[in-house]
Image (cartoon, rainbow, N blue to C red):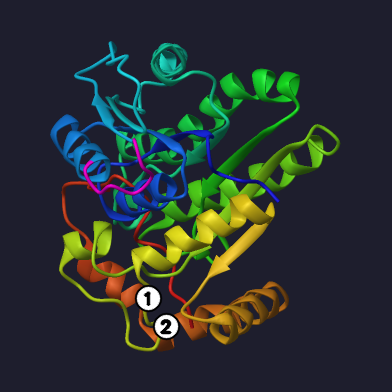
Amino acid sequence: MTALDGKTVLLTGASRGIGAVIARSLFQSGATVVGVARDRAKLAHVCQEIGSSGAPSGASSGTSSGPMASTVAAKCYSIAWDLSRSESLSDLIQTVEQTAGPVDILINNAGIERYRAFQDYTLQDLQAVIGVNLLAAMELSRLLLPSMVQRGSGHIVNMASTAAKKGHPFDSAYSASKAGLLMWSDALRQELVGTEVEISTICPGYVDSSGMMADTGIPAPQLAGSISPARVAAAVIKAIEQNQAEVVVSKDVIASTISKLLFATWQFFPRFGDATYRAIGVPQLNQQRIKPAAVELAGSTRMSSRP
């Protein structure tokens, strides 16, 4: 069991969607939250809202307008940063540690996706999606792991997707990035056995109310259903507290079990999985979502469908 009270948590993609809800849940659990995203104004709003919620007594908030952050003692900080600039992430870690001290828990929640037929992707599209969704998570973890291992404690939570379990047509770069995140997490967890550093991977289905799904204005397929950001946040908190390795987030235990069984079945019968997705409406949905600009969020809220 890992208690969140008193821990310092670095949370990427904290300015909206799942990230904002996770930040609130962490704060209510007594953690110091360091939220990171590109949108300075939204980050500051989330941090101020959390700081004024009155959740742990005596808590407050601080904000940053860039590489230099406030050093006021607080329970919530916001640091605006572009995670796609992987060469700058060592500077981000330095800023975080100067602001809030050593990072106990890293939550790699930031993500973007771009709906395209694969042949319509540009190299820049591919670099953007893989860079934010996978490379940034790997680099932040690489930078933080030595101190976690040395201290004999730490936890890294990677926000994957059920799209990592079964690829999504017309969203293949996103699916690849999340599958990479899932398999890297699986390998890293095995490497770290005996170090007291834990790795958890969260795989939500479609998430309603915020983020990518709300941006497109197109609801999830009826057969797939959707879950609330609060349910995903609760799964993250539970994964940290109970040191869970991998969590498929669905509306309830039964739905989660069915999803896991289907994903396992589709490993043996891939074309059956393809047919199931067509019946649910996943390819049709993603074709409707295709547009020239990226659909970007401060957290990976558009995940794979959940049969």
Q: Does residue 300 appear left or right of residue 60 in this picture?
A: right
Residue furthest to the front: 57
| Circle on res. 278 | 2
Q: Is residue 60 above or below residue 272?
A: above
**Residue at the (22%, 42%) spot, across then down:** 46
Nearer to us in this view, 217 or 130: 217
Measured from the top left, where is residue 211 in percent x and y?
A: 25, 57
Nearer to us in this view, 287 or 249: 249
Picture quadrant where residue 152 is located: top right
Nearer to us in this view, 206 or 249: 249
**Residue at the (69%, 72%) spot, across then down:** 267
Measured from the top left, where is residue 169 in percent x and y?
A: 41, 65
Q: Is residue 259 above or below residue 187?
A: below
Q: Is residue 141 above or below residue 271?
A: above
Residues shaded magenta? 52-58
The answer to whether the residue labelled 1 contacts the one labelled 2, judged by CB atoms less than 8 Å apart, is yes
What residue would you read off at disc 1?
282
Q: Is residue 239 above or below residue 272?
A: above
Nearer to us in this view, 52 or 34: 52
Q: Does residue 88 appear left or right of residue 42 in this picture?
A: right
Q: Amino acid at mark 1?
A: Val
Query: Gap in Å between the C-alphas at discs 1 and 2?
Result: 6 Å
